[in-house]
Image (cartoon, rainbow, N blue to C red):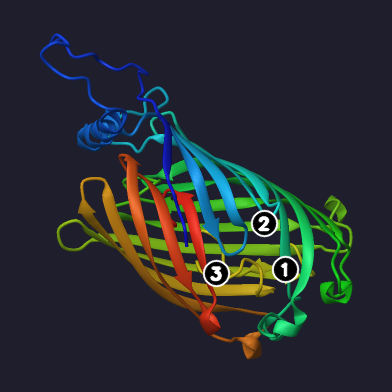
Amino acid sequence: MLTILLVMSAVTATGTVVADTVPDTLVAKPSFMKKILSYVAGDLNAPDEKATTGLSVIGGPHYDSMAKFGVGVVANYGYRLRNCHSPLPPSNLSVKADVTTAKFWSVEAQNNMIMAADKYRINSLLKVEYMPLYFWGIGFPHGKDDANKNRMKQFRVEFNTNFLIRLKQGLYVGPYLHWEYNRADSIANPELLDGHGLHQRNYGVGFTVDYDTRDFITGPTRGMYLHLSQVFFPRFLWNRNNGFTRTDLRFSIYKKAWRGAIIAADVRALFNYGTPSWATMALWGDSNNMRGYYHGRYRDKHMMNATIELRQHLWRWLGMVAWVGGGSVFHDKHSFHFLPNCGLGLRWAFRKHVNIRFDYGFGRNGESAFIFGINEAF
């Protein structure tokens, strides 16, 4: 595994650098690397109100087992709207773009906006990606059989957003909208799609309930997060022959252990009722959940899993994590097959409470993958 991280730019909230007033004849100008290290160290020691806002951009080459060698750029913008000063967590916009030698490319933008002294929140995600990947079919038996491994080119666009209203401290409720487009090309064995079409459009409406006491959204150190979304994809809403409903549950909790250590636990469940397509079923493994598995190798109507992670600060801006977990994808109670997961990772805090992460995860039968991303996995 080869990863080289290059800092492209690091811009503070003001976008200015204060020059040293000592004459150049007495003090040598710091090198570029010293300026970067000074920026990071100063940012980590700054008060939360200042350090958690502003724009930072970072990028460089990377490698992972699915997409091969590539170049990725991630940008993070922390901001505060009027009447949303500390101790409220800041709003956050993160953007990630990636292109690889395997002709994989993706652009993702996620925005968590806190408004009106945290009376309202808007959470949105937009993702566009083209993935030359492998497809094993639907269900655990297909996924574990290497003979089902087929090449498939998938183009995917996803957009979802919710508008949350605070009912009481930490409790938010609001409407949810979801739109997704998937197109599969060049699949060798289309019978593995179980009769579903190559092109899938899905329109969903529903509601979200959140209970959130985390101190920071991007890198929590304490608190809990409970999420429930109920989304309906009825046939009359342009979902053709794939009408279904989806229940998405998540519970995360964060506790400080010894000095510099945080114990984080995450439990997730996804249930689809009706006739979800090959593209909208529960997919096992991604950059935030069950890290180490090939994304989508195991897919079925339902999914349940749990992860516990130790996050340990090491020195200045460096940290590490270790996690263990597992669960299953299944279509009924008789098709539950345990899929274990564990891994290790490094963290680099290029802004306070915002980490660049390098994770290497392991799964069933020696399957493994490298993940490069921004913010904590959960």
Residue at (28, 55) in percent of width and height: 319
What is the quadrant of the C terminus in the image? Answer: bottom left
Marks 3 and 2, Cα distance to the nearest angstrom? 14 Å
For the residues labelled 3 and 1, say whether their Cβ atoms are less than 8 Å apart. Answer: no
Q: What residue sits right under mark 2 in the picture?
A: 231
Residue 348 drawn at (x, y percent): 33, 48
Going from N to C along the chain, the mark reached first, 3 or 2, is: 2
Q: Amino acid at mark 3?
A: Ala
Crowding around mark 3 (Cα neighbors within 10 Å: few <14, some 14 to 19, many 20+) is some
Mark 2 is surrounded, within 10 Å at the Cα level, by few (under 14), some (14 to 19) or many (20 or more) other residues, namely many
Report the Cα–Cα distance between label 2 and label 1. Answer: 28 Å
Which numbered disc, 3 or 1, marks the residue that appears first in the sequence? Answer: 1
Q: What residue occupies the far left of the structure in this picture? A: 26
Residue of label 1 = 134
Whether 262 is drawn above or below 56: the answer is below
Report the residue marked by disc 3.
269
Q: Disc 3 or disc 1, which is closer to the eye?
A: 1
The reply to whether residue 342 is visible in this rendering is yes
